[in-house]
Amino acid sequence: MNDISLLIDSLVNAPVILYNLAASIPNQQLKQRRIKNKWTIHEHICHLAEAEGMIHNRFQEFKNNPAPVFDAYLPESNIKTDQLLDLDLNVQMQRFKRVRGLTVDLVKSFNQLIWDRQAIHEEYDDYGAYILLRHVVMHDYFHMYRIEELWLTKDKYLIQPVT
């Protein structure tokens, strides 16, 4: 757990990296569905914004509850097909930046007792505040990788391209 400050720095930097990545992508590619039944670039970006509220609430629960219990978050079960496509991308990126700032302020207030706090999570065998912090960083960069992959990868190298 000696990397907490590095992980928090990653949380701080993710909205800027995401914004710069999105700004590099031609508008006509943002909503292009390149892989059947998989998200577009636009949907990946909007998902990050949508999930951030849930993430913030989970950190708040760690701060307020010595033994939190969490249900699985399964966006494919909660988000209707094309629902994210209807969201305004700029509004969602601003939302991500704003809520992420609140999340960063919250986790910066954690003491070691909170970082050591464990939770019960129906999806994971082990889950705590520190694991959530690391998980959020990996989640951010996983989606940013997918965005770049959808933007730059030639069709013949994409898994299950739409034909």
Image (cartoon, rainbow, N blue to C red):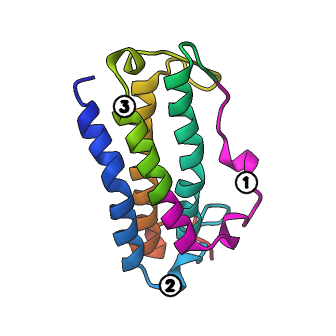
Residue 33 appears left or right of 19: right
Specify the quadrant of the image occupied by residue 83: bottom right
The magenta segment: 70-96
| Figure check: 69 above or below 92 | above
In the depicted structure, whether residue 7 falls above or below residue 10: above
The residue beneath circle 2 is: 27
Give coordinates of residue 142: x percent, y percent. Answer: 43, 50
Mark 2 surroundings within 10 Å by alpha-carbon count, few (fewer than 14), some (14 through 19), many (20 or more): few
Q: Amino acid at mark 3?
A: Ser
Q: CA distance from mark 1 to mark 2?
A: 23 Å
Question: SS for tag 3?
Answer: loop
Q: Earlier in the sequence, mark 1 or mark 2?
A: 2
Is residue 65 positioned above or below 160 on the image?
above
Residue drawn at the location 39% of the way across and 51% of the way down: 141
Picture coordinates of residue 107, whole percent (x, y): 39, 34
Name the spot of residue 33 as percent of width and height, x first.
Answer: 61, 73
The residue to which callout 3 is attached is: 109
Which residue occupies 47% across, 69% down?
Answer: 150
- Mark 1 packing: few (<14 Cα in 10 Å), some, or many (20+)? few
Label 3 and label 2: CA atoms lie apart by 39 Å
Helix, strand or loop for disc 2: helix
